[in-house]
Structure formats: C-alpha cells, structure tokens
Image: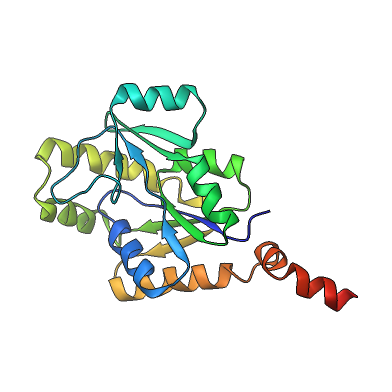
C-alpha cells in the first residue's frame, strides 16, 4: 500500500483544469503533477520535461509494447500516457500525485489502482466553454467544433467520478479542489501506512 494518494482530474478541454491544478500545487505542499508523455508537438511556451515529455509516435508505441504506461489514450490523433514507474515511485515516497486525463484513462487507472481518488471538473455551460476555447486563440473553428463535440462525450462520464467540481468562479473551484486533496489525506489506508509504527505501539 502506498502512503501517497493518486488523484485523477478529468474535464473537457477549456473547463480550466490546468489552471486549477496549478493553483492547487501552489496552495498545497507534498503533491506533484505527473508529467505525461505525448506525441503531440509542444504548444507555445511549453517545455519538454516540465509540461510534457514530448516523444515520437514510434518511441511511444515501443513504450506501450513494453507495458510501461499506467494508462494511455489517443486524443485528437495524438497519444498520451503516464509512466507507471514514475507514479509509483512518488507514491511510495509519500508524495501525492495528480494526473489529468480523459475518462478512458481514468478507467484504466481505476482498474490498476482502486484507491485512486477521481475528480471531474465541469464548465458552468457549453456557451462558456466555447467562449474559453475561442479565447485561447490557438485553435481553428474546425478544431473548436471537434473539442465541443468531444466535450459533450466527456461530460457524459462525470458519474464515474468520486467528486464533481463546477468551475464557474475560479477561486471557489480552486478551494474545493484543495479541500478534496486535504480530506483525502485523512483516509484510513494512507493514514495506516504513514502512522504504522504509532498505531502498532497504541495496540501494544
């Protein structure tokens, strides 16, 4: 059993998932973001090894064949995956890990690690979601249309998650995400591992 907790955050593109995760990492100590591998090219300002590990499709497929990923998926013709060894190393060290992925990846991880805590982030409306996507200024209208269609498909799976956060007011959503993490640290399983010696002495 791990003393750290694995958190999965899913959301349709444009719901504010990345910004909320950044706020969480600033507010809470002892939690780190899992850096995924991807075959997509870096966006402006993204750095290899910081935002993602950018690899070729050939390298990614070789890693899949060797069973190195805890989960992987293809999203908009690009592949994304999380290295099992990196995640488990942090959890064994007592570090909480936060991962962002779609519902398919969340299902894969839930099967492999049943103690995972899953969180789904919703936008307040589809109109607001489109406004946020357009405000990025990164995607063509065709890509935005594809993201909006995928958003509807993604939102349909919110019932599979442990927690639901609506990102209408950013500060409120950030506080709610923080509360989820802090409360989850007090669950029986991780607490048993962290305090094993103390509990043993109490039971004498």
Left or right placement of residue 81 versus residue 130 in this view: right
Q: Which of the 4 quarters of the picture holds residue 52?
A: top left
Residue 3, percent from left and from top: 63, 61
Q: Which of 74 and 70 is in front in this view?
A: 70
Q: How many marks?
A: 0
Left or right placement of residue 200 versus residue 25 in this view: right
Q: Nearer the viewer, residue 181 or 159?
A: 181
Q: Which of the 4 quarters of the picture holds residue 128?
A: bottom left
Is 201 above or below relative to 45?
below
Instruction: Write the residue at 57% across / 53% down.
Output: 116
Is 195 above or below relative to 132?
below
Residue 164, percent from left and from top: 46, 61
Instruction: Write the residue at 54% across / 42% down.
Output: 109
Instruction: Write the residue at 24% across / 43% down.
Output: 148
Q: Quadrant of the C terminus?
A: bottom right
Left or right placement of residue 142 versus residue 104 in this view: left
Residue 160, percent from left and from top: 53, 49
Q: Which of 182 and 83 is in front in this view?
A: 83
Q: For the view shown, which residue lies furthest in the right direction?
A: 204
Please name the colour scheme applied to the rendered image: rainbow
Is 42 above or below relative to 192?
above
Instruction: Write the residue at 17% across / 51% down.
Output: 133
Q: Which of 188 and 119 is in front in this view?
A: 188
Q: For the view shown, which residue lies furthest in the bottom direction?
A: 202
Is 74 above or below relative to 32?
above
Residue 197, percent from left and from top: 77, 70
């Amino acid at each position: 059993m791990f003393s750290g907790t694995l958190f999965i955050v899913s959301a349709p593109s444009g719901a504010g998932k990345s910004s909320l995760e950044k706020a969480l990492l600033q507010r809470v100590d002892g939690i780190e973001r899992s850096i995924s591998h991807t075959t997509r090219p870096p966006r402006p300002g993204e750095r290899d090894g910081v935002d993602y590990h950018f690899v070729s499709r050939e390298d990614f497929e070789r890693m899949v064949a060797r069973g190195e990923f805890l989960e992987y998926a293809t999203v908009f013709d690009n592949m994304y995956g999380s290295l099992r060894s990196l995640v488990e190393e942090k959890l064994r060290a007592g570090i909480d890990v936060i991962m962002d992925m779609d519902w398919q990846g969340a299902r894969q991880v839930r099967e492999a690690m049943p103690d995972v805590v899953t969180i789904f982030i919703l936008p307040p409306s589809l109109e607001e979601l489109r406004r946020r996507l357009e405000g990025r200024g990164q995607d063509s209208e065709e890509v935005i249309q594809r993201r909006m269609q995928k958003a509807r498909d993604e939102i349909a799976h919110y019932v599979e998650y442990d927690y639901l956060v609506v990102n209408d007011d950013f500060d409120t959503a950030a506080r709610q995400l923080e509360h989820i993490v802090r409360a989850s640290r007090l669950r029986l399983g991780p607490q048993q591992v962290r305090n094993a010696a103390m509990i043993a002495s109490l039971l004498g």
